[in-house]
Image (cartoon, grey):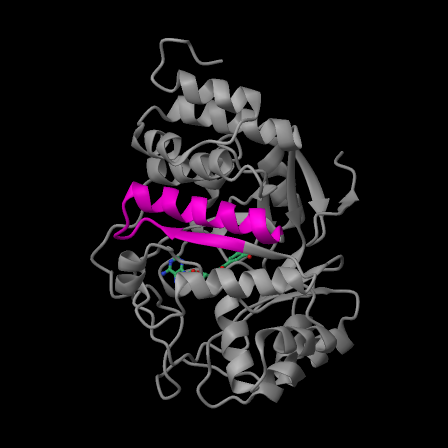
Amino acid sequence: MIPSSHPLAAIARKVEAGERLSVDDGLQLAASHDLPALGLLAHSARERLHGDKVYFNVNRHINPTNVCYVGCELCAYADDPNAPGTWSYSPEECVEMARRDFIPGTTEFHMVGGLHPRWKFPVYIDILKALKSAFPEVHLKAFTMVEIDFLAKIGKLTVPECIQTLRDAGLDSCPGGGAEIFDETVREAIASKKMSSDRWLEVAALVHESGLKSNATMLFGHIEEPRHWVDHLVRLREQQDRSGGFQCFIPLAFHPKGTKFAHLPGPDMATKLKVIAISRLMLDNIPHVKAYWVMLGREVAQVALRFGANDLDGTISDERVTHAAGGTAGKGMTVDDIQEFIRSAGLRPVLRDTLYNELRPAS
Ligand code: V47
């Protein structure tokens, strides 16, 4: 696959043998500019796991509020309660939003918001309950580790008690946001008041111990260096060895507009594809890597399917986090668009639910 004289030949042998890659291997991959070689290696790793399947789902994003007191430097989505353009929806309004343009066959609501300084714990519970009662068949993937930690605090509960209370109200799994970059120096610069990396991993472990699955993300393309990707991936891989509940890894391409880093250009295509490939190669114990089309951009997401990604996320309908920061990929895709998009990359679309049960054999 890769000639024996190639600088990545030793890594290629490990990938072929299914051996775990070391930190040094990760650093060597990150330093390589040989995109075709990185793509070949990562594609072979994804083929071993998933053949030619590309998973997608029919989902909808719901953001009950964009009010947040944390004020992360990387974020253009959230603001304080008095800022113009902020919203805080009641449980009934969340249900109303979920009903709007509801696509039949929707299996997931992806719900994240902000850490609202005035909302009390029961508000969040009421939102979950209202959505679950209106849509009992739809999986509620809600609240990042940052939100779970915050909810436990305002609910005066331990994190396991909080998770149990959320589950009783309808929570089915958790999305992967808020991980940002685990390196403490970079984290301090882009998300100075957010929970620490260790705490993010600790809360994820508690979610997994409770029996729920979650995802994990990495925000790249800002002030970090390639070594920080490798550090992040290895910390996640170690956590997965311990707690085992991460289903999917999602590299998030930084969008600078409206953030404290508006002067930066954001990651280019080579960086996006390299990060997808390294993620697939380093994370041998997390089954799925998502090419999140909203943040990568549709065209790069399609190529990413041949750089190690085997999942596209879904129809989404109403994306707000990326769009607040200048995203231009569109707010939603139809099922037909997604299937055509995957087929045109020479791969096989497979409709899934949030837990990766296959719902309809690909045609
Ligand atoms: O937590 C915030 C990131 C995340 C910006 O689990 C930004 O299936 C880029 O986590 N540029 C929310 N990224 C999105 C997220 C997610 C998305 C899709 C699927 C899943 C999943 C999770 O977006 C935040 C933060 O890390 N973010 N601001 C920005 N300017």
Q: Is residue 168 visible?
A: yes
Query: Magenta includes 77?
Result: no
From the viewer's side, name the closer residue of 256 and 153: 153
Q: Left or right: where does residue 32 sit relative to residue 363?
A: left
**Magenta region's main secondary structure?**
helix
Residue at horizontal 34 percent and vertical 39 percent from the top: 271
Q: Position of residue 321 (x, y in %)?
A: 44, 64
Region in magenta: 216-244
Q: Is residue 347 in sight in this rendering?
A: no
Examine the structure image and report whether residue 223 is included in the region drawn in magenta: yes
| Quarter of the view holding residue 82 | bottom left
**Residue sitting farthest toward the left:** 263
In terms of depth relative to the viewer, which is nearer, 138 or 308?
308
Q: Residue furthest front?
A: 242
Q: Is residue 266 above or below residue 132?
A: above
Q: Is residue 118 above or below residue 113?
A: below
Q: Residue 49's spot in the image, x, y percent? A: 64, 32
